[in-house]
Amino acid sequence: MENYIEDIKDLLFEYAPSVITALVILIVGLFAIKFIVNSSRKIMNKRGVDITLQKFLLNLGSWILKILLFITVISQLGVATTSFAAIVAAAGLAVGLALQGSLANFAGGVLIMIFRPIKIGDLIEAQGEIGVVKEIEIFTTKLTGLSNKEIIIPNGSLSNGNIVNYSTEGTRRVDLVVGVSYDSDIKQTKEVLMNILTSNDKVLKDPKPSVTVLALADSSVNFAVRPWCKTEHYWDVFFETTENVKLELDKAGIEIPYPHRVNINKTE
């Protein structure tokens, strides 16, 4: 038992300095990485670097520094870095095959940063989802959905798929279809609909809003009502116009056709 205790003491005296030094390096290194990342962020802000690029580069730089810190710590513990490098190289193929999706997502993130189809704050539609770009990370892109839900899309799928960016141009056209009865006067209907658009402050004067006959349907004359607005006013214009169409057509005595149900009571 005494020999066992002596062996433990010898091991502690032998490895304690290395372990303590490794812990100090780890703690100091983590604080240093945090300081470097925060300092880099301040420098980028002063130089006006785009927020999207900032977050991506800082995220990438943080991971690289942490990996270097990890290698430094294990080398301090006595693990030969040459052996570690050999192990990493030997396992590289297997890891690469296992992480094909992650590597594709990383490459997709790099492509997004290079070609810049989207940026933070853009309203986009991709992979069947619609939302505002919240953050572009190394492997994934986070969106805030229209109902305030978080949507996470892998960068590989995002970069290789179709992206509809609603924010790029700054303006959007609202497409509405309004059907009225065949008994209604076309000119009067167009005037009422156009007045609804021109009286809305959120509807742009240029490009001009338009009201045109779209189709002669089975039970209605359909009008294409198309106001333009700023991107951030899209849903306001959509809902306000929809509501005002019903109110103003009712005031003008113009009927919006709808199915009627007739109840027939049979008496014997």
Image (spheres, rainbow, N blue to C red):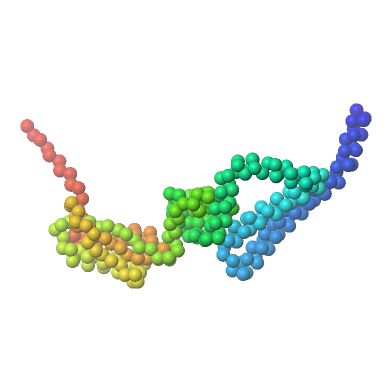
Q: Residue 27, image x and y in percent?
A: 76, 51
Quadrant assignment, res 240: bottom left
Q: Residue 50, image x and y in percent?
A: 56, 65
Q: Residue 47, image x and y in percent?
A: 62, 69
Identify the image quadrant of the N terminus.
Answer: top right
Q: Residue furthest top?
A: 1
Judged left or right of residue 110, residue 36 is right
Q: Residue furthest left?
A: 268
> Toward the viewer: 171 or 75?
75
Q: Residue at x 18, y 51 (%)?
A: 218
Q: Residue at x 75, y 54 (%)?
A: 29
Q: Can you see residue 18?
A: yes
Q: Can you see residue 150?
A: no
Identify the image quadrant of the C terminus.
Answer: top left
Determine whether 20 is above or below 204 in the image.
above
Quadrant assignment, res 51: bottom right
> Toward the viewer: 265 or 221?
221
Judged left or right of residue 230, residue 9 is right
